[in-house]
Amino acid sequence: MGKFRISILFFIFASCIAYFSIQAQDRSSDTTALKEGSWALQFGIASNFTLTSFQGATFAAKYQISNTNAIRGGVTINGNTNNGDGSNSDIVDDTSIGAASTSNSAKSTSITFVIQYLWYMNPNAQVHFYIGIGPSFSYSYAYNSSGYNNLFFVNGHGYWSQQASSSNSTQRSIGAEGIAGVEWFACSWLSIHAEYNEGVQYQWGSTSASSGYSSTYPANAPSHNNTNSNNNGWALNSSGVSFGLNIYL
């Protein structure tokens, strides 16, 4: 699969370079897509020259307001749910000496949104330098629960023990990101960019957990434990230098 992706990408670049060579004599600012109304889909370039999500976004796009200004944004949505049950028993000499059942449940969801305003400093040059800034927001939620029921025998009498636990976690962040980069057009509809990203975020969240246990041997009152915590703080993030691919529509 990796070799296939590289082959496809190489074919695209070869086609663009050929087209670029033919049009080189007439090259001007009009040969790029940096003009009002242009749209671009954005992808990241990972190791081994494979395409990946841009800025971690499931979908990322850019819109040119003019040849010197653009807006780009990305949104990432993830979700997961999982449920499971299990059981086991111990038998000695055709006699059951214990049986247990378990249950587990987990679910999580997250969403991240970022939008940035870009300024192109030299739209008529062959290599375009740009800077940008914009807000970012993220939200995540996770829930986990587990249960354990155990039947065991003591002196021929059956007894039960039960145990259950669950936890909830919610995290949010809001901040701003600044970027500085360069973009080069291989042809009028395809460009490569390299950029540096720096951001600051304020993060806050909460976590709660509960657990309980009871047993009929020895007979005891059910025990419960509940905990709650909150957190908040600032974070400074840097992605270093990243590379991307823009396909203009």
Image (tube, helix red, strand yellow):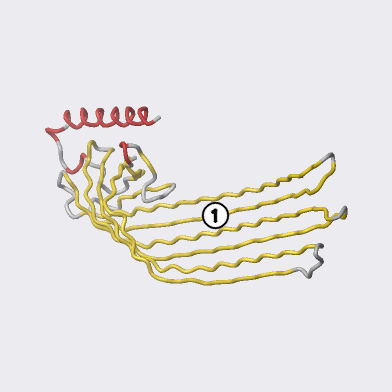
Q: Which residue is mark 1?
A: 109
Quarter of the picture holding the C terminus: top left
Q: Measured along the vertical axis of the image, is residue 33 above or below residue 200?
A: above
- Image point 82% across, 53% down: which residue? 153
| Left or right relative to 228: residue 12 | left
Q: Position of residue 128 (x, y in %)?
A: 19, 48
Foreground residue among 88 and 4: 88
Q: Residue shown at 66%/70% (left/top)?
A: 225
Kindly identify the amino acid type of the residue bearing the numbered disc 1.
Thr
Relative image position of residue 95 (x, y in whole percent):
84, 43
Neighbours of disc 1 within 10 Å: few (<14), some (14-19), many (20+): some
Q: Residue sitting at 23 percent across and 52 percent down?
A: 181
- Looking at the image, residue 93 sits to the left or right of residue 176; the answer is right
Query: Which of the pair 156/222 is nearer the observer?
Result: 156
**In the depicted structure, whether residue 128 falls above or below residue 222:** above
- Image location (x, y in percent) of residue 230: 52, 72
Among all residues in the image, which is located at the extreme left?
A: 25
Residue nearest the viewer, comparing 51 with 206: 206
**Point 32% across, 47% down: residue:** 37
Label 1 SS:
strand
Q: Is residue 146 left or right of residue 71?
A: right
Can you say which quadrant of the picture contains the N terminus?
top left
